[in-house]
Image (spheres, helix red, strand yellow):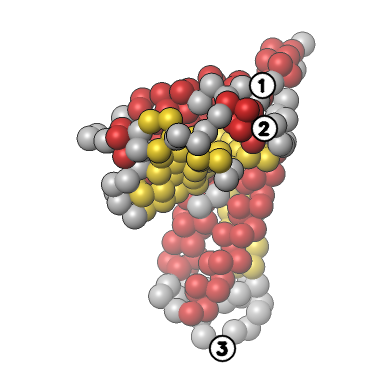
Amino acid sequence: MLGLIATDARIGTEALQYLARFAADQSFNAITIDGDTSTNDTLLLVASGKAGNPEIIGTGTAEFGRLATCVVEVAQLLAQAIVRDGEGATKFMAITVEEGETREEAMKIAKAVANSPLVKTAFFASDPNLGRILAAVGKAGVADLDQAKVGLWLGDVEVVKDGGRAASYTEAQGQAVMKPAEIDVRITLGRGVESATAWTCDFSYDYVKINADYRS
C-alpha cells in the first residue's frame, strides 16, 4: 500500500507530523483484510502551503481541527476502499467496540474480531454462529474483562445482553442481518467510555483461490 494525501494549507512541520499519525491511526491502522501487512506499506501527508493562509496552522487551533476532520475523512475513504477491494471480499464489516477503559483496548478487541478467520467465514456464509465473535473478544487478551457486562449488536439487532443471549434474539434475525453486503457490528464492554472501530471484510472461497494462484 502506497498512500499519498496532499493539502495546500500552510501548516507547521510538527503539526503536520502529528496529523499524519492521527489520521493513520483513525484509518489505515484500523483496517485489516487478513492481519498481514507489507514491509513497504506507506502513508504520506504533504502540505504545499500554497493556500496562503495568514498564519501557519498549529495543533490546538480551530483551523487545525477543521483540517484534521477533512484529512481523516479522506484517509478513511481510501482505507475503507482497500477493505472493499480485499481478495474475494463479498462483505464489508465495521467492528465498533464501545465502553472500553482505553481506546487501545477497544481497538485490540475490534482487531481480534476483525482478524478472526472463523468470524470472517461466518459472515461470508451469513451463519449466525455468533459465539465466534464472543470467543474473539475473549481471546483479545484484555485484562479483567467482565464477560457479564459484554453486549453485542448486529445492526439494530441485540444479540447479547449482559454476557448472555438477549431474550428477544432469534437466529433468523441474526441470519437476516448478516446477509447484506455491509454490516455493522457493535460490541459493548461496560467498563469505560472509550471506543474504536476497525473495518474488515469476509473470507470467501475466492480468497483462497486468489492467494494460492496469483503467482502461478
Residue at 35% from the left image edge and 27% from the top image edge? 138
Where does the N terminus fall, quadrant-wise? top right
Q: Is label 3 in a helix, a strand or a loop? A: loop
Report which residue position mark 3 lands on.
Answer: 54
Where does the C terminus fall, quadrant-wise? top right
Q: CA distance from mark 2 to mark 1?
A: 11 Å
User: In this view, which residue lies farthest toward the left?
Assistant: 144
Report which residue position mark 1 lands on.
Answer: 125
Q: Is residue 130 visible?
A: yes
Residue 176's tag is 2
Q: Is residue 20 left or right of residue 1?
A: left
Q: Using a 10 Å C-alpha cutoff, classify the residue at mark 1 as few (fewer than 14 neighbours), some (14 to 19) or many (20 or more).
A: some
Residue type at numbered disc 2: Ala
Q: CA distance from mark 3 to mark 1?
A: 56 Å
Residue at 56% from the left image edge and 88% from the top image edge? 54
User: In the depicted view, which residue is nearer to us: 142 or 46?
Assistant: 142
Q: Is label 1 in a helix, a strand or a loop? A: loop
- In the picture, residue 9 is in which quadrant? bottom right
Whichever of labels 2 and 1 marks the residue nearer the N terminus, that label is 1
Residue 135's tag is none
